[in-house]
Image (cartoon, rainbow, N blue to C red):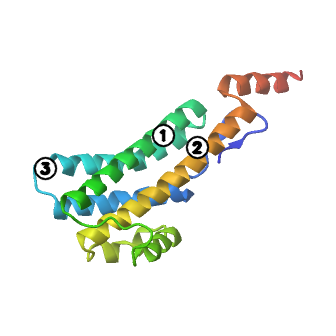
Amino acid sequence: MATLNKNGFLQYPGDYHNLLFYKKAVILYDMTYWYQDHYLQRGDRTKDQMEQAARSGKQNVVEGKADGMTSKEMEIKLLNTARGSLLELMEDYEDQLRSRRLEQWTKGHPRYEQMVQYCYRYHDLQHFRPYYERWTIEEFCNVALTLIHQADRGLLIYLREVEKAFLEQGGLKEQMSAARRRVRGY
């Protein structure tokens, strides 16, 4: 979460690299790039759409955090755009399973809980790359869906924190006015 500069109005946005939803978005981008390169045909529009959705899910976190230094409104909009892109990617992975007549794992599936726990526990590409290059399409898509759900949950929680900070601290103009009054001593 961004920290307020007590002497001024600019907020240090924090290092987005440490946000778990960003780390999951990085994993998803690399996984999706590999997936579309290995399983989708050249010229298939889905190939480009999946890559762009995965990229947008990651890049909009970066831009949103940077813009959050001066605009909570832009931070919220861009983080929500990241969310929307990841949900679009989720739909693509669900389509991949359905169109190939593969199973989407849910509670009760023998591998579901283990998969969810693995994705919850690990946040770095090194814990996924050795496996996703060997997974079946069904395994790959189900892990990707789990990562998307976890990133989405993290983004929702974080957006609520940004909303709370805005309600408590106000927007940039309010913070600028308050900082100016402090400097002037009134």
Helix, strand or loop for disc 3: loop
What is the crowding at mark 2: few (fewer than 14 residues within 10 Å), some, or many (at least 20)? some
Q: Name the residue rendered at 61%, 49% in the picture.
A: 14
Q: Are marks 2 and 3 in contact (CB under 8 Å)?
A: no
Q: Which residue is mark 3?
A: 44
Q: Which residue is mark 2?
A: 159
Is there any visible trace of residue 168 in the rendered image? yes
Q: Position of residue 129 (x, y in %)?
A: 34, 72
Q: Which one is earlier in the sequence, the residue at label 1 or at label 2?
A: 1
Q: Which residue is mark 1?
A: 80
Q: Are marks 1 and 2 in contact (CB under 8 Å)?
A: yes
Q: Position of residue 179 (x, y in %)?
A: 77, 27
For the residue pair 143 and 9, the one nearer the viewer reads as 143
Q: Which one is earlier in the sequence, the residue at label 2 or at label 3?
A: 3
Q: Name the residue rendered at 37%, 59% in the picture.
A: 28
Q: Relative to residue 90, is residue 177 depicted above or below?
A: above
